[in-house]
Image: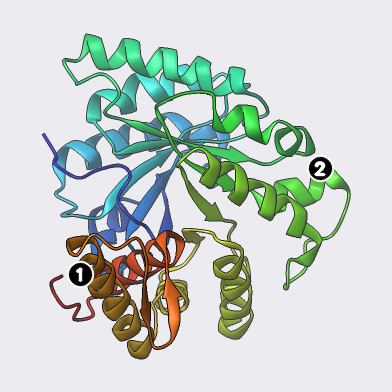
Amino acid sequence: MKERSHNHPMRSLLYIPGNHPGMLQNCAIYGSDAVIFDLEDAISISEKDSARKLVKHALKGFDYGNIGVIVRVNGRDTSYFEADLEEIVPANPDAIRLPKVDSAEDVLAADELISRLEEANGLPRGRIGIQAMLETARAIVNVNSIAAASPRLVGLTLGGQDLAADLGIRATKEGYELLYAKSAVVIAAKAHGLQAFDTVFTDVNDAEGLREQAAVGFALGFSGKAAIHPSQIPVINAVYTPEPNEVAKAAKIVAAAKEAERRGLGVTAVDGRMVDAPVVTQALRTLELARLAGMEVPEL
C-alpha cells in the first residue's frame, strides 16, 4: 500500500490524458507535485472505456514515488461515473477529482460509493480523498455546504472555463472576471481545512500570462494550480516558491516563537515586529513551501 498522503501540499498538479500510455508511465519526471489522470474532458466518448482501463493499470503497475496521484472521473450526471469509480477506487489513487459538483449531494453520492468500494476491496475507509470541482454559478452559491459535505473532502478547485461559460462571459488571461468565485472557493476551503486549487491557464505558449495569473491566485490564498502542459510546471512552482530572504525571516520567526513558548511568554518580537500566532502560522507555511521547492530549511 502506498504511504503518500492525499493531503500533502501540492503547488502544481499536471493533467495527464488517461488515454496516453507514455505520459501515464513517465509523468513523474515532469516535476509537478501531483498528477491528475483525466478520464473526463480530455477523453472522447469512444475512448472512455479504454482510458479507464489504462489508468487503472497505470495506478497498479507504476511507482510514482512521493507525488500525489489523482484521477478525474466523469461527473455524476454521466453514465460513466459509477464505472469510473468501480474500476479506479480498487487501484487506490490518492484522491478522486470530482467534476461538475453543484451541491453537497454530489459529494455525498461519490463518498458513499467510494466507501462501499474501499470496503469491498480491503482498503482503509476514508483513505481516498475527494477534490471537488466547482464549475457553475450554482456551485459557487453552494460552496460552503459543499466544503462541509464530507470528511473525505481534501480540496476544492475552480473549473474556470466551464464557470465562464455558465456565466455567459469570456474568460480572460488575467482572470479578474472570476475574482469573486476564486475568493469564495479559497475562503470556503480554508474555513474547512481543505486545500484550494486554482483553475488552468489554457495558453501553453504564454509563460508570462501564466506567471501573472498564478501570482494572483497565490495572493488570493490558493494552495496550488493545475497545469495542462509540462512546460507550465516550473512557472507555477516558481510562483509558489518563497524568496530566500522570506525563508530566512520565517525561520527566525518560528525559532523566536519556540523560544518564547519555552520561556512561557505569549508573544515575542522579531526585527521590531510583534510575533503572535497568525504570524507564526504564516511563517510555517513559508517554510513548508520552501521544503517543497527543495530549499535548505534549518531544523527548528
- Can residue 78 be seen from the camera position used here? no
Name the residue beneath numbered marker 2. Answer: 166
Q: Return the residue nearer the eye: 269 or 19.
A: 269
The answer to whether residue 147 is above or below residue 189 is: above
Q: Position of residue 285 (x, y in %)?
A: 37, 64
For the N terminus, which image quadrant? top left
- Indicate left or right for 126 with 39 as reference: left
Which residue corresponds to the image point at 30% horizontal and 14% vertical from the top-left?
Answer: 117
- Indicate left or right for 176 with 105 as reference: right
Which residue corresponds to the image point at 36% horizontal and 90% vertical from the top-left?
Answer: 245
- On residue 259, which mark appears? 1
- Indicate left or right for 298 with 168 as reference: left
The image quadrant that residue 94 belongs to is: top left
Residue count near mark 2 (Cα–Cα under 10 Å), binned few <14, some 14–19, many ≥20:
few
Which residue corresponds to the image point at 19% horizontal and 45% vertical from the top-left?
Answer: 4
* Count of marks placed on residues: 2
Q: Where is residue 162 in the image (x, y as percent from the top left)?
A: 72, 46
The image quadrant that residue 96 belongs to is: top left
Kindly state the secondary structure of the residue where label 1 is placed: helix
C-alpha separation, residue under disc 1 versus residue under disc 2 = 52 Å
